[in-house]
Image: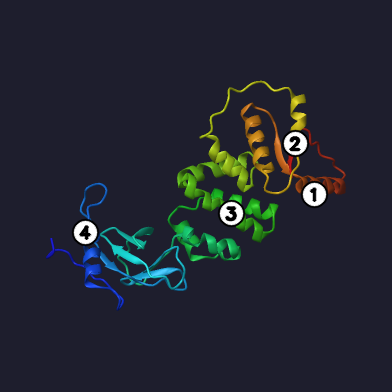
Amino acid sequence: MGGNLSLTVEQSQNDTISHAYAYREAASAPASGGELRVGRGSFPKVDQAGCAKVRTNFYSVPLRSGSVVEARVYCSIVEFRQNDVWVAQHERSYERAQQIHDLEHYLEVLEREPGALRGSKPLAQRRTQGRWPDSYDQLWELMNEKHDRQSGTRSMVAVIRIRREFGYAKLETSVPQAMVLGFTDVAAIRHLLMSDELQHAAATTVDNGALAAYERLVGEPGTGNTHLAAGLTIAACRQKKRVRLTTDAELVNQLVEAQREAEPQPHAGTLVAR
């Protein structure tokens, strides 16, 4: 096996021959499916753009600039590890001088600097890959209208993070459903994603009078008011009831606007979350 294994290891002065031998053994270990995976290894540093150079290309990794990462190059993938812990994986590019980005590697940065998302290369690449459907842009615009652009974009970043829990396919399906129900809140979208996993009791007819206790959910921020209101809204929709989820601020703005236009709007059956 030794004659067929091509291995290149860029080592620091403190690395030893035994370390290189141990890496060679790990690189040629069988994969989980039993197939032998032989790869070339290197130890590049993460640059200011959050990328590690492997051969002639740059691949994003979710590590701090200056970090040393172990890169393993296989026929179809490039895998990155740090301290023997898997941190990232990309489809291998056989072109030259390419920058391959994964949008999720930049979410922590984008939460601090949300304005950088719209024109970013990671987002452009995700669009090219067909992994950014039109519904995401529609939800993003609704969030910007509900909040300011910075807060709306930060909320969109939070929605993208949810994919780590529920997967890309489920999130792509749930976003259009959320907009149909009028949800533009991250907590409400999360509840919608979780609803299929929750075991619900058999639906029973509820007297409208009993819902009066839930017309206005009051509490400090972060205590779950929006989450509870979203759950009640989804339950009501499943019982074919008409209901609308809103907030105090939205309701006041609508009333002020309606007063200006002298066209009062009915608000019966509205759940208000504070």
The answer for how far apart the CA atoms under marks 2 and 1 are is 15 Å
Identify which amino acid the numbered label 3 is placed on.
Answer: Met
Q: Mark 1 points at which residue?
A: 253
Number of other residues with Cα within 10 Å of mark 2, as a class: few under 14, some 14 to 19, many 20 or more: some
Q: In this rendering, is residue 82 above or below 267? A: below
Q: How far apart are marks 2 and 4 (CA)?
A: 62 Å
- Name the residue beneath numbered marker 2: 270
Check disc 3 and report the residue beneath it.
156
Q: Position of residue 175 (x, y in %)?
A: 56, 44
Determine the image quadrant of residue 179: top right
Q: Describe the element under mark 3 as helix, strand or loop.
A: helix
Give the residue displayed 45% in from the left and 65% down from the top. Answer: 63
In this view, the residue in front, 235 or 7, is 7
- Say how the picture is coloured: rainbow
In the image, what residue type sits under mark 1? Answer: Asn
Left or right placement of residue 190 versus residue 43 in this view = right
Image mark for residue 28: 4
